[in-house]
Amino acid sequence: MIDLLAQELARTSAELLPLVCLFAALAWFGVYGAILFIIDVREHRLPNVLTASLAIGASLLLLTSSWTATSDSFLAGRALPAILGALAYCAAMFLLHVVTRAGIGMGDVKLAAGLGLYTGFLGVDALIAGFVLAFVIGGAQAVYLVVFRGASKSTRIAFGPAMLVGCLVVLLM
């Protein structure tokens, strides 16, 4: 009887682990996203330890969620798209960093790795949507600053918050 109970508990735990990891990954994003948002708004910087923590936590939790999911689960097979999403988003932001001569900061490039994991986990459409939304939100922020705050071309704008909000919108869709 105890053996049967242990087997049932193991089977149930195995089915729950992917979902627990997924919810933990979303909570991880919420905590680190909020901290990074506040720091970037206040100080115009994204600390390496925090962007790395976001990416490492996301990779451990999202990849575990995908790898432990049963083959018929909607979570199965999402590990590779998540990894490719991180690489693609990071590469695109690095290219923009080079082209804009540091108009996009290296903190934004590093943040893209973590955000690419989250949006890539959901697929190519989500990855592209998160990337585009970041620039739409950042552009709206720039227009607001120019029109209502008298900002000029030399005004520095924290782009990390726009990236985080773009990712959040995609995660909530």
Image (cartoon, grey):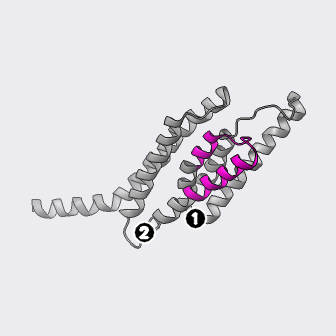
Q: Quadrant of residue 150?
A: top right
Query: Looking at the picture, how far across and down is residue 139, in whole percent?
Result: 80, 44
Tell me, yes or no, whether the highlighted magenta stretch contains residue 106.
yes
| Residue drawn at (62%, 60%) of the image | 126
| Residue drawn at (75%, 35%) of the image | 157
| Residue drawn at (43%, 67%) of the image | 76
Q: How many marks?
A: 2
Q: In this view, does 42 lie to the left or right of 28?
A: right
Tell me, yes or no, whether the highlighted magenta stretch contains residue 168.
no
Q: What stretch is highlighted in magenta?
A: 86-112
Q: In this view, does 120 lie above or below 55?
A: below
Quarter of the image with the N terminus in it: bottom left
Q: In this view, does 158 lie to the left or right of 149?
A: left
Q: What residue type is labelled 2?
A: Ser
| 45 or 149, nearer to the observer | 45
Query: Looking at the picture, how far across and down is residue 58, in whole percent?
Result: 47, 49
Q: Is residue 110 visible?
A: yes
Tag on residue 123? 1
C-alpha span from label 1 to label 2: 15 Å
From the image, state whether disc 1 or disc 2 is nearer to you: 1
Q: Name the residue under label 2.
A: 73
Q: In this view, does 27 lie above or below 84?
A: above
| Residue drawn at (60%, 29%) of the image | 39
